């Protein structure tokens, strides 16, 4: 598909060329697998809580240090500090800010590094939005494709794209994370800057030089310039941002629902969530349609806070009441469940534990909680159907949930509209199938590749039905990207045949993630 901005930048061909990935069997030496394995080892390895991996320490001592010697530090502490310095967010901090973060993490550079890895582990590089998609490569380049009616692809126009197009206006800027909402996109750079484009109502904040509601190229969010942002999330009515200091800011949807503040619904000024989060170090945020989950870091284990609309029990507090300020989900301690990832689906939620268990709660429509029924749950419950599976990844969409096991297999439960439960080849079988318990996704198993991340569309279908059915991306350890589901606007990155509105089986997307 022609990308006008790319042609203008190169001065030659108007067709974007992509580097293919050689079709080789998945290997443990692949760049994607190495990065994921390193993150999991450093953060959730076999060491006791807080211990630094010996392998990382040995690697450090094979190279010169990047700082003056500090004889008061133990060798693992020195190695940890050196690895922290390799992170841009840490490198750009003043010494006073570094020391303050160290104290908040528990007084150890090992714990600071663990906190950083927890955050990096939960970055979103492949995002399936309603009607459009965004992919961030390991080099920090950004590709977008799909519906572009509001300029949400950031390509300088409002023309839909059926193949991935590089956003060349970001040249020289390394993007680390992306968030996609209804007709809008937010990107976060390695220097903490936030860029937004697409529909600007409620979504980002003050767009510099914005003359209307269509932002077709990435613009810095001016009101967040004083905050070093490391993660962004977009809900149905609000945006949220996580700072490197572990603080959470929300934009819009104030007053009645009050996401931690009481401003006008159209307010575009970032509001700091304080109250119960005053002295809490947040490591990850995840937004549903009308609520927000926050994974809080503690040296002795993680905890989860929630805020927003409580209908269906999706806040996890044992009731269906709204919460205007963040509240700790206490039930995890009852389950002896130490969460390391949270996933706020449109109407239901999930959490991954450090022992490989998965908990779900909230609305249970189409069996998306995986408990064998469609009842809502007001408290987190362990998915017993995964008792023989050690999960390493969990993701949620609208009434659908995906889980990746430690051997790379993918399981799913919930809505068949996402074509998610391995019945893609037989439409009649899908109509009669039970999606209320975990099913192995056979079509992904057939690829003979290990999955690393699953990204389903996470937004209300009835609000975005003109953009087609939900779609899903599967990122493999090899760096290969596959897509299936709805694709009438080009959001799969693969053009469909005439008369076809979705893919029932995964198809390769022509992007080199690594």
Image (cartoon, grey):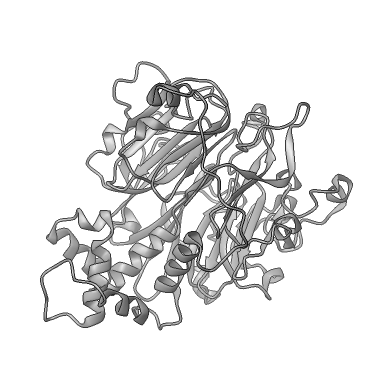
Choose between 318 and 237: the one closer to the eye: 237
Report which quarter residue 492 is drawn in.
top right
Residue 407 image offset from top left, x and y in percent: 62, 70
Report which quarter residue 74 is drawn in.
bottom left
- Whether residue 318 is visible to the viewer of this picture, yes or no, is no
Choose between 136 and 405: the one closer to the eye: 136
Residue at 64% of width from left, 55% of height from top?
401
Residue 144 image offset from top left, x and y in percent: 50, 35
- Residue 407 is left or right of residue 143, and the answer is right
Residue 378 image offset from top left, x and y in percent: 60, 59
Task: Please tell me whether residue 353 is drawn above or below residue 251 in the rendered image.
Answer: below
The total number of labels drawn is 0
Residue at 39% of width from left, 40% of height from top?
187
Choose between 369 and 23: the one closer to the eye: 23
- Residue 145 is left or right of residue 52, and the answer is right
Residue at 25% of width from left, 44% of height from top?
227
Residue 420 image offset from top left, x and y in percent: 71, 51
Task: Please tell me whether residue 256 is drawn above or below residue 402 in the rendered image.
Answer: above
Residue at 57% of width from left, 27% of height from top?
1
- Residue 249 is left or right of residue 162, and the answer is left
- Whether residue 46 is visible to the viewer of this picture, yes or no, is yes
Which residue is the extreme one toward the top? 211
């Amino acid at each position: 598909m022609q990308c006008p901005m790319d042609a203008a930048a190169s001065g030659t061909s108007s067709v974007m060329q992509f580097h293919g990935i050689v079709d080789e069997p998945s290997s443990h030496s692949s760049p994607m697998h190495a990065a994921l394995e390193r993150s999991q080892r450093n953060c959730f390895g076999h060491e006791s809580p807080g211990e630094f991996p010996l392998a990382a320490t040995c690697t450090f001592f094979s190279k010169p240090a990047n700082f003056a010697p500090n004889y008061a530090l133990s060798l693992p502490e020195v190695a940890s500090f050196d690895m922290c310095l390799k992170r841009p967010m840490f490198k750009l901090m003043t010494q006073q800010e570094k020391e303050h973060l160290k104290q908040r993490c528990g007084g150890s550079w090992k714990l600071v590094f663990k906190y950083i890895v927890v955050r990096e582990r939960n970055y979103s590089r492949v995002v399936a939005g309603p009607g459009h998609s965004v992919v961030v490569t390991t080099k920090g380049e950004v590709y977008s494709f799909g519906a572009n009616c509001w300029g949400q692809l950031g390509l300088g126009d409002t023309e839909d794209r059926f193949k991935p197009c590089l956003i060349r206006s970001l040249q020289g800027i390394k993007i680390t994370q992306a968030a996609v909402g209804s007709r809008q996109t937010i990107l976060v750079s390695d220097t903490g800057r936030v860029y937004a484009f697409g529909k600007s109502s409620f979504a980002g904040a003050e767009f510099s030089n914005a003359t209307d509601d269509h932002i077709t190229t990435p613009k810095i969010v001016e009101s967040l310039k004083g905050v070093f942002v490391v993660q962004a999330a977009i809900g149905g009515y609000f945006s949220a941002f996580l700072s490197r200091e572990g603080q959470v800011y929300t934009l819009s949807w104030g007053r009645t629902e009050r996401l931690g503040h009481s401003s006008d619904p159209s307010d575009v000024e970032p509001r700091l969530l304080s109250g119960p989060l005053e002295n809490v170090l947040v490591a990850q945020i995840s937004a549903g349609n009308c609520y927000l989950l926050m994974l809080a870091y503690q040296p002795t284990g993680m905890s989860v806070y929630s805020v927003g609309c409580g209908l269906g029990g999706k806040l996890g507090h044992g009731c269906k009441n709204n919460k205007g300020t963040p509240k700790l989900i206490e039930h995890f301690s009852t389950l002896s469940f130490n969460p390391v990832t949270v996933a706020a689906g449109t109407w239901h939620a999930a959490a991954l534990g450090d022992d490989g268990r998965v908990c779900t709660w909230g609305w249970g429509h189409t069996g998306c909680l995986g408990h064998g029924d469609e009842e809502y749950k007001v408290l987190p419950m362990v998915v017993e159907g995964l008792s023989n599976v050690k999960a390493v990844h969990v993701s949620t969409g609208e009434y659908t949930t995906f889980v990746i096991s430690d051997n790379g297999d993918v399981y799913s439960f919930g809505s068949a509209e996402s074509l998610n439960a391995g019945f893609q080849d037989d439409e009649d079988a899908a109509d009669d199938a039970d999606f209320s318990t975990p099913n192995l996704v056979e079509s992904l198993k057939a690829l003979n590749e290990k999955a690393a991340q699953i990204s389903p569309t996470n937004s209300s279908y009835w609000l975005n039905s003109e953009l087609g059915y939900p779609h899903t991306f599967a990122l493999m350890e090899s760096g290969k990207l596959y897509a299936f589901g709805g694709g009438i606007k080009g959001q799969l990155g693969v053009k469909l045949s005439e008369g076809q509105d979705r893919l029932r089986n995964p198809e390769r997307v022509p992007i080199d993630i690594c």
